[in-house]
Amino acid sequence: MSIARPHDLGPAAWERDAPLATCSGYRTGGTARWLASPASVEEFQEVVRFCRDEGVPRLVLGGGTNTLIADGRYDGVIVSTQRWTGIEDLGGGRLKVRAGSSLRGLIGRAVHLGYAGLQGLIGIPGTVGGAIWGNAGGASRAGSSLATEERWISRWVESLTVLDEQGRESSLRGAELPWGYRFSGLGPRIVLEAILALEPGGDAGALKRETRRLYLRKEETQPLRAASAGCVFRNPPGESAGRLIERAGLKGSRIGGALVSERHANFIVNDRGATSTDIEALIERVRRVVRREHGIELEREIIVTGGGRG
């Protein structure tokens, strides 16, 4: 099947036969037939309609920090949100944020304005759109790996602007969505922007110190500077995936360049030039050993896609 770029999108928005390693937190992955980087709502709509009309798959990536892109070729369109950025202060603790904005940048802006609420998300990489789509969250207390609603980004989402599979734009109230652990219910819809309602009136200096303290504490127990996709597995009910993996003796396990982190067992990192195949094989080894040792089937939190998987 031959895919031609739509003529009414600017050349800078499209790249053919694009290498995907730079789009992934793991710094691995194959190529995509097309990489589209929209910089307006109209360009997002055109990309979505193009994929619909041509019958080709599409995959939306923000920072690629919760995704393992397979080796090989993705025979479709990767839609990057990284040119779609911007944060607007609406006053009273409310911020309008475009989906491609970094979560870290959002937290920094909120803290600077004295808006509290997002500090517990510090250290989570990626973009705001990805964080909302996957309902990113932090630990419920220092030293805990189990997240609660109090630390999920969904708590602060007042409203969203999204595109559906037909390229139609619509608004949703945050309260309409069936939020859950690492779940938003958005499905194939693309997050364009969000309005977050935070707690105004905080002391910016105190919030900055708290955020710094939380980051340093996370850095002690998580490989925040390594190439990874964050936590690989969801926590089973009442359990910690990291502790299950550690008790199974898997810290430091390696396949090729992929390594189960010595700092936090629920992180698999690209340690020495790993391929996506290495990482996926290590993920399956961890699942197999934990199943054998604990009788628990770990469910992936990261998305494995690309390389023809769709």
Image: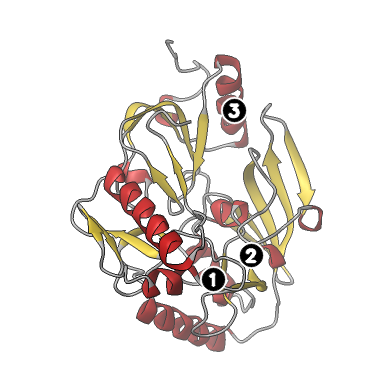
Q: Earlier in the sequence, mark 2 or mark 1?
A: 1
Residue type at tag 2: Ile
> Which disc is residue 153 wearing?
2
Q: Nearer the viewer, residue 299 or 205?
A: 299
- CA distance for labels 3 and 2: 26 Å
**Where is 250 relative to 272, above or below?**
below
Q: Nearer the viewer, residue 287 or 293?
A: 293
**Disc 3: CA contacts within 10 A as few (<14), some (14-19) or many (>=20):** many
| Quadrant location, the N terminus | top left
- Residue 253 pos. (x, y %): 26, 63
**Where is 139 relative to 51, above or below?**
below
Which secondary structure lies at badge 2? helix
**Where is 10 relative to 257, above or below?**
above
Residue type at tag 1: Leu
> Residue, x 47% and y 68% (percent of image)?
294
Q: Do labels 2 and 1 touch, CB within 8 Å?
A: yes
- Residue 25 pos. (x, y %): 37, 53
- CA distance for labels 2 and 1: 8 Å
> Residue, x 49% and y 84% (percent of image)?
143
Residue type at tag 3: Val
**Disc 2: CA contacts within 10 A as few (<14), some (14-19) or many (>=20):** many
Which secondary structure lies at badge 1? helix
In terms of image quadrants, where is residue 169? top right
**Disc 1: CA contacts within 10 A as few (<14), some (14-19) or many (>=20):** many
Q: Is residue 249 visible?
A: yes
> Which disc is residue 121 wearing?
1
Q: How many numbered marks appear?
A: 3
